Each structure stands twice: as C-alpha cells, then as structure tokens.
C-alpha cells in the first residue's frame, strides 16, 4: 500500500511489490502496440505482482482502477505506462494527495510518444515498450518513500531599496497584511526617481509613494542602512543590517542602477553635458543663441528604452523651445516601449534629424564647439557637423554595491551589469534562490511605469510564497552521508539554489529540503560520493534499458524529454534502439553513469539538456558539459572512441533537433569497456 503514514520501511524495501498500469489511450494504440504481449512481459518482471490495462487515464474515472490497486495492502509501488505525463499528471497528483498516496513510489514511462508514434513497425515498438517498462520497474524497486514535514514561515518581507520598484513592492505587501522592513542606503525615500528632471511624472509618483509609506503602520523604514549578511533559509532568514537585525521570510532586492555621466564617457570637451543637465537647461531656459545641437546614444554600449525615450523627449523639446537644428545620433533606437513609436514620429515631425551610425562618430573640440564626423548608415553619406552643444546619454550600470550584495544573498555574480541572471526560468522576478526576488532596474532596464509593475509582481510572488505561516515540504530530496562527507564545500559552492548548509559541529554538509530543487548537481559534483538524490540515485540511473548496439539518451526533463515528446506528437521516426532515460537535469549525470551504460552494451551515450541560458537549474548543463569533456579526454587516452559520448543542448520544442541528435548517435564504433573495471 502506498500510504505515507502506514507503510513500514523494512517490509517496503525488503520485498517491494509493484503494479504496472498500461494505458491503452482509449484504444487508439492497439494498431501500434501489442498490449497483451507487453502485459505478459511486464508480469514476468521481478517484483511485479499485478498488471492493469486502463482504457484512458486522462478521462474522468480513468484512474479509479489504478487507485484501487494502490490501496491494496499487497502493492507497495506502481508504474504507469501511458502517454506524456502532461496529459494526466495534474489529475493523478490530486488523486494521490487526496488518497494519501506517496508520489515517490509511483513512476511513469511514456510508451506512446517514445514508442508507438515514432516506430512504425509494431513489433519493434512493442519490444521497445517492454524494455522501457522493464528498466523503469527496476528503478522503481529501488525507490524509497519520502514523507513531508511542516515548515514554519515568517511572513515579514525585507525590501532592499526605496526607489519606485521597492516602494511599490512594500506597499503591495502591506496591503496583503505582510509586515515589511524597507531599507535604503540613502537618507530619503524615492531613489533616483526624485532626480528625474527629464520625466517629472516619475519624480511625482515617487513622492506620492513615499508619503503613503510614511503613513503605513505595517512598513518599517530604515534609511542609511545596508545589508551586511543574510543567514538562514527561505521562510526563516536572518538579515544582519548596519542597524541591527531583521528576521524575515523573503527578501526583495530593488536597488536600481547607478549612472556614469558624460564626463566619464568622454574627454573633457567644452560644449558637452549630460541628458540630466540638458533637461535642467530646458526647464529653466538657461541657454540661448544656439544654432545647432546634438544628442548622442550608444556611445560606449547600446542603450535601453529609457535612454531612447529621454533622447526623443529632449530633442523635441529643444527643437521647439530654442528653434535650433537638432540631431539625434545613435546606433539603434529602442522603440518597443509604451508609446515610443509615437514619440519617434512626433520628434521627426518636430524637425529632429536622426543619424544612425553603427560605429561611434569621431568627436573633437573646435574652439568652443564640438565637431562630429562619421557615416550615416541609412543614407550611406558622410557627415561632418559642428555643434554648439552635445548632450551625452548616461550609461546605466549596475549599482556599485550590487556585486557585494548578490554575494551576500548567494544569488550569483551580476551579469552584464544586472543582478538577475539571463535565464528564462527566472523571469520575471526570481533569483534562483527560494525566497530571494529581484524587482526594478537592478534586474533589467525598465522605464518607470514598468518598474512599478515589477515591484507589484515581486510582491505578489512573495505573497504566494508566504501566504500562510507554515508550509508542507518534502522531508528530504537529497541527502548527505556524514560518514562520507569530507567537508570540502564542493556541494556548497556548486548548488545553483543555495540549498546546502554546512554543519560546523559535525563537519558535514546538510541539504535544506525547502530550498532544494532536486536538480542533482551537487550529487554529481561531490568527489566523495556522499550525496544521493531521491528517485535518481546512482543505482537507479545505472539500470540501463539498452539493447545491444543501442543509443542511451540521458534526457533532461525540462528540455530534451519534452523535445522527445514533441517528436512523438509530430510522428517523427527514429530507430527503436534509442532508449531514453529521464533525469531532472543534465547536471545530475556523472561519468560513472555513462561508463556503466557503455559497459551494458550501449553503442553511444547522449546527454541532452538545456541551452546555457535556459537551464532551469542555472548552470547544470554547464557543469555537465565540463564533466563530459573530461570523460571524452580520458576515453581518448585509453584508446577508445570519444565520439561514443556526446552532450548537446536543445529546447522543448526542438523535435527535429532531438531526432537529429539520436539519429547521429547511432553512428560510430562500439567501444570496449572492460567488464572488470571498477565502475
């Protein structure tokens, strides 16, 4: 019986009894698969005491027969052989939860998209389905029951940064009855928005938000305060500040960006100034008798939508107020922001001349004027202009203390001047570490209305995490054996989600279950083999479904496995000798798993995962690639063909790319791995 509170571990692991459920997909697979033969083969597998044939698991009542079998005291675990789990996972998980069935003792194998729909030959598809079921049953026999534990949560949220995004996040959380601690290194609320002379609406909104915060009793404001360190885990963080300590359940980072001004970008040239100074001059109408002025973007690097908006506004204002010739120099204009296409059209109607140059114009001093020489890429003509004034756009960069802040938060180094990694799985506001969120311009260039939306999004995410004072979490997902742990800190450094803590007293690493994402990166990186991952142990991954002269594919469940499903849905065909082994991340694969697959008879082994910037576990594929390249070097030194092991990247929609990978994977000479080698 797969019931969490009543199963006895000793009996459970000594003689596990399994049920195999075959879904016939409402009878549509009868022509592609020989279900009686598959059922007979499954019934002969060690530990399988019952084989069920369900009509359609995804239909109402389709899982009743399976649930009845799982409640049988003689059944301890079950394997579902059906279509891609996307069609029935949610319904079954709800049924498992309501019937107190431990999900870790239920496994799945896809016999529709991976067998019936990709192999036209019925006999070959049937044989492959039987092999996949056999290997899945073998792994299921080694599965262990994992219970849950109650974890207390502190509903207070720490917001770092009091700009537009930070203040909006604090107010949104307070409206949801969260206590909020808002800290800023400045001596006032509002951040750089209060200095916005180009866009006065931003400054006005900042003053309004600051006033509301001062009147809100749920928000504690600490000015001139910095974060010194952050300890603890999601739900129970301890933030050590320059003014005491703040306990909280989550942290929102909204520190914004600093600016490099014009003089820092250009040599000291008379007649140059920043956009902010130009805005102030326009506001007070200080300059006169100007015949020709210019504004320049993308001087050192391509700039964002906010810089484009500011340039268009200032150019139009200068043209109308001073009546002078006005030129806007740029590499590209970012017009995807709110109403920016209309602003561009208006600037052109006002008489602003836009000159696009892919290379920086030559800028020199000419008495009291500024001279620009270059080539207009749109017309192909050279230009040589003498300007009375040149305004240079500020170059936004990460806040000077951002690198130190992200190090304290253990969210990784800032990339391209931004605190948030460039990864699709982190959008919009995640950091990769549970309970740490980013909002506003510290994570991506944003205009002020978008910064407000970003603050609201971060607040909503934090509220979702902390809506209750307690949560249920798995008792363990990965586990460290203290007897094997060398206290080398490898797992601590390699964990992409900061889910490893170090027990100084016992000199061993500890996995924090509520922080762990079960990627397995720490397991593969551990040199002492002291860490194991539930459901994906070394013993389970070493059970190979390979037949002689086969290709074994270790497929990431977030990309390659979904690409294989897409190939099945598109009815793309490939050899039935390709065997797919699902893994949570390519970063879980150890060279030992590859060698054991080769030793078992595989002709080639493929490790297929995400692209570097689309890895759900941030750098799992990067670490896997480094390991596999080392293995390929070692195979070459042993005189074996290194091409028998390959690693690749793809997306969930890359059905054709998946088929190309596995088709090419069937080529090459079979290496000989000595059977007596200790693997």
Image: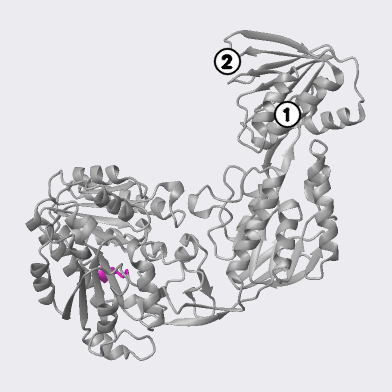
Picture colour scheme: one colour
Kindly report the distance in space between the C-alpha atoms of the residues bearing marks 1 and 2: 19 Å
Above or below — where is 366 with respect to 123? above
Label 1: how many Cα within 10 Å (few below 14, some 14–19, many 20+): many
Q: Quadrant of residue 153?
A: bottom right
Quarter placement of the N terminus: bottom left
Element on which disc 1 rests: helix
The number of numbered discs placed on residues in the rendered structure image is: 2
Q: Which region of the structure is painted magenta? A: 536-540
Q: Which residue is mark 1?
A: 311
Residue at 78 percent across and 46 percent down: it is 192
Horizontal side of 587 relative to 429 (left or right) equals left
Residue 328 located within the stretch drawn in magenta? no
Horizontal side of 90 relative to 240 (left or right) equals left
In the rendered image, residue 565, in percent from the top left (x then y), is placed at 28, 54
Residue at 70 percent across and 29 percent down: it is 343
In the rendered image, residue 403, in percent from the top left (x then y), is placed at 64, 51
Label 2: how many Cα within 10 Å (few below 14, some 14–19, many 20+): some
In the rendered image, residue 539, in percent from the top left (x then y), is placed at 26, 71
Horizontal side of 33 relative to 174 (left or right) equals left
Earlier residue among tags 1 and 2: 1
Residue at 11 percent across and 53 percent down: it is 549
Residue 670 visible (yes or no)? yes
Horizontal side of 350 relative to 623 (left or right) equals right
Q: Quadrant of residue 63?
A: bottom left
Q: Which residue is mark 2?
A: 377
Residue 153's tag is none
Quarter placement of the C terminus: bottom left
Element on which disc 2 rests: loop
């Amino acid at each position: 019986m797969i019931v969490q509170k009543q199963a006895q571990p000793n009996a459970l692991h000594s003689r596990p009894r399994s049920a195999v459920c075959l879904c016939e997909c409402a009878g549509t697979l009868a022509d592609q698969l020989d279900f009686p033969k598959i059922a007979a083969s499954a019934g002969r597998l060690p530990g399988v005491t019952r084989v069920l044939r369900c009509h359609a698991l995804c239909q109402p009542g389709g899982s009743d027969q399976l649930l009845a079998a799982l409640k049988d005291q003689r059944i301890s675990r079950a394997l579902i052989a059906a279509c891609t789990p996307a069609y029935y996972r949610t319904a079954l998980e709800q049924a498992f939860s309501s019937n107190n069935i431990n999900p870790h003792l239920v496994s799945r194998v896809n016999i529709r998209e991976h067998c019936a729909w990709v192999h036209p030959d019925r006999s070959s598809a049937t044989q492959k389905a039987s092999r996949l079921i056999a290997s899945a049953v073998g792994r299921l026999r080694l599965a262990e029951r994992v219970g849950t534990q109650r974890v207390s949560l502190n509903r207070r949220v720490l917001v770092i940064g009091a700009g537009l995004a930070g203040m909006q996040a604090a107010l949104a959380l307070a409206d949801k009855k969260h206590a909020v601690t808002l800290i800023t290194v400045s001596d006032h609320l509002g951040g750089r928005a209060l200095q916005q002379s180009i866009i006065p609406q931003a400054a006005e909104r900042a003053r309004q938000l600051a006033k509301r915060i001062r009147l809100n009793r749920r928000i504690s404001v600490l000015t001139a305060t910095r974060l010194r360190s952050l300890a603890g885990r999601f739900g129970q963080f301890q933030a050590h500040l320059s003014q005491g300590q703040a306990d909280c359940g989550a942290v929102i980072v909204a520190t914004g960006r600093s600016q490099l001004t014009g003089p820092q970008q250009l040599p000291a040239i008379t007649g140059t100034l920043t956009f902010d100074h130009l805005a102030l001059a326009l506001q007070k109408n200080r300059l006169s008798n100007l015949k020709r002025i210019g504004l320049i973007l993308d001087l050192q690097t391509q700039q964002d939508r906010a810089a484009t908006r500011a340039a268009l506004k200032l150019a139009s204002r200068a043209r109308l107020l001073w009546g002078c010739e006005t030129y806007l120099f740029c590499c590209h204009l970012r017009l995807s922001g709110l109403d920016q296409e209309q602003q561009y059209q208006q600037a052109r109607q006002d008489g602003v001349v836009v000159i696009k140059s892919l290379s920086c114009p030559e800028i020199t001093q000419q008495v009291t004027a500024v001279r620009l020489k270059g080539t207009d890429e749109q017309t192909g003509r050279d230009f040589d202009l003498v300007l009375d004034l040149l305004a240079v756009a500020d170059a936004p960069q990460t806040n000077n203390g951002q690198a130190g802040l992200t190090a304290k938060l253990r969210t990784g180094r800032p990339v391209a001047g931004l605190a948030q990694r460039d990864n699709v799985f982190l959008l919009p506001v995640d950091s990769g570490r549970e309970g740490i969120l980013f909002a506003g311009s510290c994570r991506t260039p944003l205009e002020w209305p978008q910064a407000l939306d970003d603050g609201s999004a971060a607040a909503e995410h934090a509220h979702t995490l902390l809506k209750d004072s307690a949560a249920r979490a798995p008792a363990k997902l990965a586990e460290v054996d203290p007897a094997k742990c060398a206290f080398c800190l490898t797992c601590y450094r390699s964990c992409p989600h900061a889910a490893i803590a170090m027990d100084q007293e016992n000199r061993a690493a500890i996995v924090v279950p509520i922080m762990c994402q079960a990627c397995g990166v720490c397991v593969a990186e551990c040199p002492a083999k002291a860490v194991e991952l539930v459901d994906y142990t070394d013993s389970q991954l070493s059970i190979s479904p390979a037949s002689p002269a086969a290709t074994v594919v270790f497929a990431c469940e977030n990309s390659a496995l979904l690409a294989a499903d897409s190939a099945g849905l598109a009815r793309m065909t490939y050899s039935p000798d390709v065997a797919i082994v699902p893994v949570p991340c390519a970063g879980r694969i150890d060279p030992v798993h590859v060698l054991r697959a080769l030793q078992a008879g595989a002709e080639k082994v493929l490790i297929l995962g995400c692209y570097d910037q689309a890895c759900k576990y941030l750098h799992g594929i990067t670490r896997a690639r480094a390991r596999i390249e080392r293995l390929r070097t070692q195979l070459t030194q042993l005189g074996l063909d290194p091409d028998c092991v390959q690693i690749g990247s793809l997306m969930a929609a890359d059905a054709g790319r998946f088929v190309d990978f596995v088709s090419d994977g069937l080529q090459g000479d079979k290496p000989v791995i000595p059977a007596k080698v200790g693997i």
